[in-house]
Image: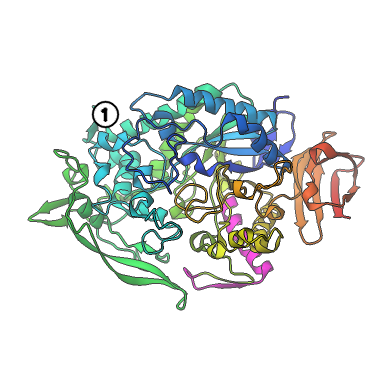
């Protein structure tokens, strides 16, 4: 039976049957960033020369495997998918040449998700623009269109790409060649920054720069939206498809930045701590792109000082390679941002990217707001009921918040990670040190409280959306690396340890995150489920040595057991109220004892559904309902609750 449509009612999702829905889902999946044919996993060498002929049919998994994977996700209690696709997957062959086989495949994947009770919102994913610039997302032919030669990016030091830096014969972790979790530094590198600036703000900074007869910004956004429309047209009639993400973790490029400033620590211009990596200025980026050697400070974590400090100076583009094609001109030089003379570069306007007509530019208000409007308009021309799942540049936190002209029926789909755990692949417990700020947290309660405060601020950003009536907050991404502490759990697994012991840290970290989500009654889609994940530090999720998948095929030792292959399941397979005939008031789960309590204010005779996983209650459970009665649906791991003679209903579940 088709799932009922979902609408927005203030801070809640509400279905067309009138019940509020709490969406607890997962991102599917981490390897959708790379082609299936040929296998685009970043642990496999490539020069990207085949970028026009690749195929993404089979990401996240072949349709023949859908029953296994969807069945597993349903058994784990998920009711929502943030389903990944990419611009490249749709339009890799060239302008307006859409991959029809992939569109058919993607639509069928969405249909099958409905059979397992999964709502879907489509995530047009990207990380640091494209595979050729160290991530995923945009097709390669766009570089040629704007005058850039991606085959020269590595030689010029204009990108930081695993396939160019990694020693594949050596394998494993290579902190000397490609340090773990460094892909995001590409946002600061010139190839990335130039493309993002053109995509969001080309009309402002270089309006005379035309690509195939159109302003560069219009050209780029038109093709991006066209790829979205191609997907949208295929899934427009599926009731479980509830909307589209605007664009995963968009970059701001050079918008708002002074020309010469290098961020090496808190300052008047930037009060935040520095991050590891090269401290590029805008002028450094343009110099390297034009073929000038440039010495740039490199920042790194000093665990003794509990700070990010300068480690050394790095000479970038020593060979003097330009990334512009022969005959192509840098549009920002032509527009007056800088000039090149006598082998030297000079800023002509220090505030070129930060001010216009005496007014300071704001990425959110000036560029993201109009972009949100374009996405919503184009999608809703195909299906008027779709929701917009909006994201801002995560590098700016929530900056100035969502722009005031964000379209109606928008969901706050921001992301959040414990950035120390994510970037260092360490979860120090019970004493947790933040090397970026120098702060220390001691004990589970303190860590959980910190998570709750951070997520609470993210949720508060929803209050101004939808004309001030508020919006649901759906945490679009969060999660943990499973190769913590130099992959200690994998080494224990290889040694034959099948106990919960090696996964204790993972379970604790996830439990604290979900406790915070419960306290805030937030929706979420965890990052991620990768069907091809391997217990291998060079592979992981198949992309840049990330390894956050809640499933690994290497750990699937019993095909008859739906849980086989799952990682740290007790950290996220947990009870929650997913459909509520009323207003949720309080939800809390105590993993150690198995006690779950949910309180809601009933608003009618409808049915409330609580997911109760067998995994947490291997010997069964007892249910007590104050103000109502419950029926068990053991086959679906659900209890169904009806209010009886009371406006307030409290459900308590205890482990036997």
Relative to 455, residue 219 above or below: above
Q: Which residues are magenta?
A: 435-459
The x and y percentages for residue 565 are: 65, 48
Q: Secondary structure at mark 1?
A: strand
User: Which quarter of the image is occupied by the C terminus?
Assistant: bottom right
Of the pair 598 and 189, the residue shown nearer to us: 189
The x and y percentages for residue 587 are: 76, 52
Magenta segment, prevailing SS (helix, strand or loop): helix
The x and y percentages for residue 328 are: 17, 39
The x and y percentages for residue 327 are: 14, 38
Spot the residue most to the bottom. Answer: 304
Residue 514 is inside the magenta segment:
no
Write the residue at 42% across / 64% down.
Answer: 272
Horizontal arrangement in the rendering, residue 388 relative to residue 517 (left or right)? left
The answer to whether any part of residue 508 appears in the image is no
Q: Residues within 10 Å of mark 1 (few under 14, many from 20)?
A: few
Of the pair 13 and 180, the residue shown nearer to us: 180
Horizontal arrangement in the rendering, residue 420 relative to residue 162 (left or right)? right
For disc 1, the marked residue is 214
Write the residue at 37% across / 33% down.
Answer: 221
User: Which quarter of the image is occupied by the N terminus?
Assistant: top right
Write the residue at 60% across / 49% down.
Answer: 554
Quadrant of residue 70 in the image? top right
């Amino acid at each position: 039976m088709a799932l009922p449509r979902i609408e927005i009612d203030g801070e809640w999702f509400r279905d067309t049957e009138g019940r509020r829905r709490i969406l607890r889902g997962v991102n599917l999946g981490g390897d959708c960033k790379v082609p299936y044919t040929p296998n685009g996993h970043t642990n496999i060498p490539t020069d990207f020369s085949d970028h026009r002929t690749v195929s993404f049919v089979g990401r996240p998994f072949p349709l023949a495997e859908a029953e296994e994977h969807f069945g597993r996700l349903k058994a784990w209690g998920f009711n929502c998918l943030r389903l990944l696709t990419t611009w490249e997957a749709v339009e890799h062959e060239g302008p307006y040449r859409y991959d029809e086989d992939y569109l058919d495949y993607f639509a069928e994947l969405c249909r099958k998700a409905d059979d397992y009770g999964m709502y879907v919102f489509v995530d047009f994913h990207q990380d640091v623009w494209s595979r050729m610039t160290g991530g995923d997302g945009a097709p390669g032919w766009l570089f040629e269109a704007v005058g850039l030669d991606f085959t020269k990016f590595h030689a010029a030091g204009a990108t930081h790409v695993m396939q160019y830096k990694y020693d594949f014969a050596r394998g494993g972790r290579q902190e000397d060649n490609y340090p773990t979790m460094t892909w995001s530094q590409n946002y600061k590198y010139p190839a990335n920054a130039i493309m993002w600036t053109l995509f969001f703000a080309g009309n402002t900074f270089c309006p005379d720069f035309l690509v195939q007869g159109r302003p560069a910004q219009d050209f780029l956004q038109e093709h991006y939206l066209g790829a979205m429309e191609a997907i949208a047209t295929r899934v427009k009639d599926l009731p479980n498809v509830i909307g589209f993400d605007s664009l995963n973790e968009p970059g701001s490029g050079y918008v708002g930045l002074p020309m010469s400033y290098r961020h090496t620590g808190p300052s008047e211009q930037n009060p935040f701590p520095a991050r590891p990596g090269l401290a590029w200025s805008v002028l450094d980026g343009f110099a390297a792109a034009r073929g000038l050697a440039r010495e740039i400070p490199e920042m790194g974590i000093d665990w003794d000082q509990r700070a990010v400090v300068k480690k050394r100076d790095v000479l970038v583009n020593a060979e003097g390679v330009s990334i512009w094609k022969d005959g192509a001109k840098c549009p920002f030089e032509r527009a007056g941002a800088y000039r090149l003379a006598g082998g030297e570069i000079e800023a002509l306007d220090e505030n070129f990217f930060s001010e216009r007509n005496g007014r300071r530019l704001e990425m959110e208000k000036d560029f993201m707001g109009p972009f949100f409007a374009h996405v919503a308009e184009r999608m809703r021309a195909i299906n008027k009921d779709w929701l917009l799942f909006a994201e801002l540049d995560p590098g700016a936190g929530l900056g100035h918040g969502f722009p005031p002209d964000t379209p109606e029926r928008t969901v706050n789909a921001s992301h959040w990670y414990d950035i120390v755990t994510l970037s260092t692949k360490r979860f120090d417990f019970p004493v947790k040190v933040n090397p970026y700020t120098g702060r220390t947290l001691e004990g589970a309660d303190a860590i959980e409280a910190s998570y709750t405060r951070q997520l609470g601020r993210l949720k508060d950003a929803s209050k101004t959306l939808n004309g001030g009536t508020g919006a649901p907050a759906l945490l679009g991404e969060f999660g943990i690396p499973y190769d913590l502490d130099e992959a200690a759990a994998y080494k224990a697994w290889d040694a034959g340890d099948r106990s919960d012991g090696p996964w204790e840290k993972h379970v604790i970290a996830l439990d604290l995150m979900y406790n915070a989500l419960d306290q805030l009654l937030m929706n979420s889609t965890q990052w991620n489920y990768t069907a091809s994940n391997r217990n291998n530090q060079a592979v992981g999720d198949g992309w840049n040595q990330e390894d956050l998948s809640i499933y690994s095929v290497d750990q699937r030792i019993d095909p008859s057991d739906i849980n086989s292959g799952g990682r740290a399941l007790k950290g996220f397979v947990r009870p929650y109220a997913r459909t509520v005939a009323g207003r949720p008031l309080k939800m809390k789960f105590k993993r150690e004892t198995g006690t779950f309590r949910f309180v809601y204010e009933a608003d009618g005779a409808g049915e409330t559904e609580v997911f109760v996983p067998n995994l947490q209650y291997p010997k069964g459970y007892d249910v007590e309902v104050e103000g109502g009665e419950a029926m068990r649906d053991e086959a679906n791991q659900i209890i169904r609750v009806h209010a009886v003679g009371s406006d307030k209903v409290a459900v308590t579940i205890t482990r036997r």
